[in-house]
Image: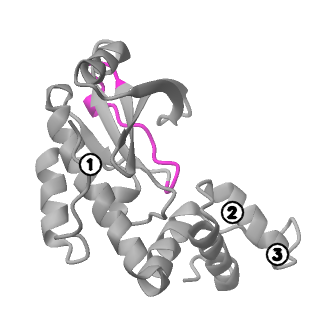
Amino acid sequence: MAQRGVSGELVYETARIICEEAVLDYRSAKLKAAQRLGLGSRAAVPDNAAIQAAVIDYQRLYGGLPYRHHLTALRAAALRAMKLLAAYSPRLVGGAVTGAVTLAHRVQLHAFAEKPETIELFLHDRGIACEQADRSYRYPGGAEESVPLVRFEAGAVGVDVAVFGFGEDRRLPLSPTDGAAFRRLSLADAEKLVASDPATGSGPTQTPVR
């Protein structure tokens, strides 16, 4: 798991903390891992891409059925939510795409509307309770912007929808994991991902999004 001279032990311990203790923030997990290993403040810190790869490896080795079932549930809920929100050009991002998830992870979607309230009203009209929050995204050049977030529950799985303005589909924010532009999957791409992955090609049926 070691990359770019980073201690494999630190990478492994960080991934273990993320997976076993449901720590979503990579930075916090890295700091906790360094403390537990007795490493000083000058210790080489693994980059987030290395941590993500280690999380995937750890879950495939030790996550067992709970991990596979949760990843299946996330992707299934993502497909249903994307079909429901088709009018807002939803795109799947994050751990459900890469497989770097724990039981604490939710579905992450990017959608596009003139106002975030449009999606809130759309969900309320269909009897789906939701709440509004916000999330900070960084863009190439260093700009950081707050984007409205609509959150709702799809059975046992949570769904977060970041609502970008019309025309923002080609202006890609940067993933906090690797610093590269977010990989946004369309519904068709997400369906291909599910169909091609033996771990999630079929799985337990979840409560449908109405």
Identity of the amino acid at label 3?
Answer: Arg
The residue shown at (51%, 26%) is: 133
Q: Is residue 185 visible?
A: no
Question: What residue is pinned by disc 1?
Answer: 78
Judged from the image, the secondary structure of the residue bearing numbered disc 3 is: helix
- The answer to which of 163 and 176 lies nearer the viewer is 163
Dominant secondary structure, magenta: loop
Q: Is residue 51 above or below residue 132?
A: below
The residue labelled by disc 2 is 29
Left or right, 76 with reference to 160: left
- Locate the N terminus and report the quarter of the image it occupies: bottom right
42 w.r.t. 187: above or below = below
Residue 171, image quadrant: top left
Residue 31 in the image, given as x and y percentages of width and height = 76, 62
Nearer-N-terminus badge (2/1): 2
Q: Is residue 168 one of those drawn in magenta?
A: yes
Mark 1: amino acid: Ala
The span from disc 3 to disc 2 (Cα, nearest Å) is 11 Å
Q: Residue at x 25, y 19 (%)?
A: 122
Is tag 1's residue or tag 3's residue first in the polypeptide sequence? 3
The segment highlighted magenta reads 164-178
- In this view, the residue in front, 112 or 81, is 81
Image quarter where the C terminus lies is: top left
From the viewer's side, name the closer residue of 47 and 111. 111
Residue, disc 3: 36
Q: x%, y% of residue 65?
A: 37, 79
